[in-house]
Image: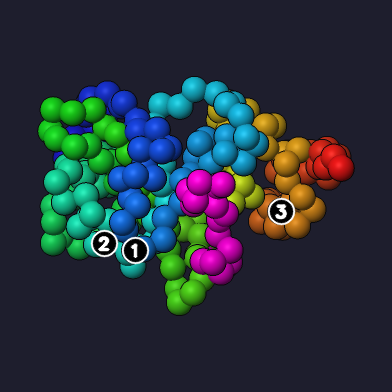
Amino acid sequence: MIAEDDLGRWDPLGVPEVAALLAEVAAPWWVAGGHAVELAVGRPVRAHSDVDVVVLRPDVATFRLALADWELWAADPPGTLRRWDPGEPLPTRVHDIWCRPTASAPWRLQLMVDERVGGEWVSRRDPRVRRPVAGLGWRTATGVPVLAPEVQLYYKAAAPRHRDEIDFAAVLPRLDEGRRTWLRNHLGADHPWRTRLDDEGPTPRRG
């Protein structure tokens, strides 16, 4: 195992490159993280050090096969990486996989492994938080699957960093009442975002 900080630099794929790389994968996946926020608001918001894609645990072998020529490393809590070789089961404690084309290449993609029970996505933070897999995201005009903004914010809300606050402020005006209600219902009672969800209403649509 090696500490994550010692494993070299990132040169993340762009969203179109991610879509091309995973175009033939039959299992569901969604662009996540800050890129998902930017796709929801329709404009650049901030710089990105990586690119995240959410996949579901029952499908991880499918993605391992799709990236058979790549090096994949499992992020073992609390912050070390080890090679995840073909045919090796992924431990249930692992929720992040770093991916690069070769050992000498920079990291290009991070797979974030979420749970699935039947037809439902299940939050890895709280198994009581669920929603149908079919409603976990949306598609851009070019067909790229993107994690729903309220789900992305739910994960960011656990321990918001400066960049998470930037993302929240950017996407908040785009959240309709249904998305606000879902997020509000899954935040802690004293979470500071709850007040903003109530006080800063969605931007009215034109026309």
Q: Amino acid at mark 1?
A: Ala
The percent coordinates of residue 43 (x first, y second) are: 61, 29
Q: Secondary structure at mark 3?
A: helix
Q: For residue 205, which quarter of the picture?
A: top right
> Residue reaching furthest bottom?
118
Give the residue type at disc 3: Arg
Residue 130 lies in the magenta stretch: yes
Question: Does residue 31 appear in this view?
Answer: yes
- Tell me if label 2 and label 1 are in contact, CB under 8 Å: yes
Q: Looking at the rendering, in which quadrant would you find the N terminus? A: top left
Which label number is shown at residue 179? 3
Q: CA distance from mark 3 to mark 1?
A: 28 Å
Q: Residue at x 28, y 41 (%)?
A: 98
Whole-angstrom CA distance, mark 3 to mark 2, is: 31 Å
Circle 3 or circle 2, nearest the eye: 2
Q: Which residue is mark 1?
A: 26
Q: Of label 3 and label 2, which has the lower sequence position?
A: 2
Q: In the figure, 61 relative to 191: above or below?
A: below
Residue at (54% x, 52% y) in the render: 139
Return the disc, 2 or 1, that comes first in the chain's sequence.
1
What range is drawn magenta here?
Answer: 127-146
The residue pinned by badge 2 equals 62
Residue 127, disc: none
Mark 3 vs mark 1: in front: 1
SS for callout 2: helix
Left or right of residue 61: residue 37: right
Amino acid type of the residue that numbered disc 2 sits on in the rendered structure: Thr
Front residue of 56 and 81: 56
Numbered disc 1: secondary structure: loop
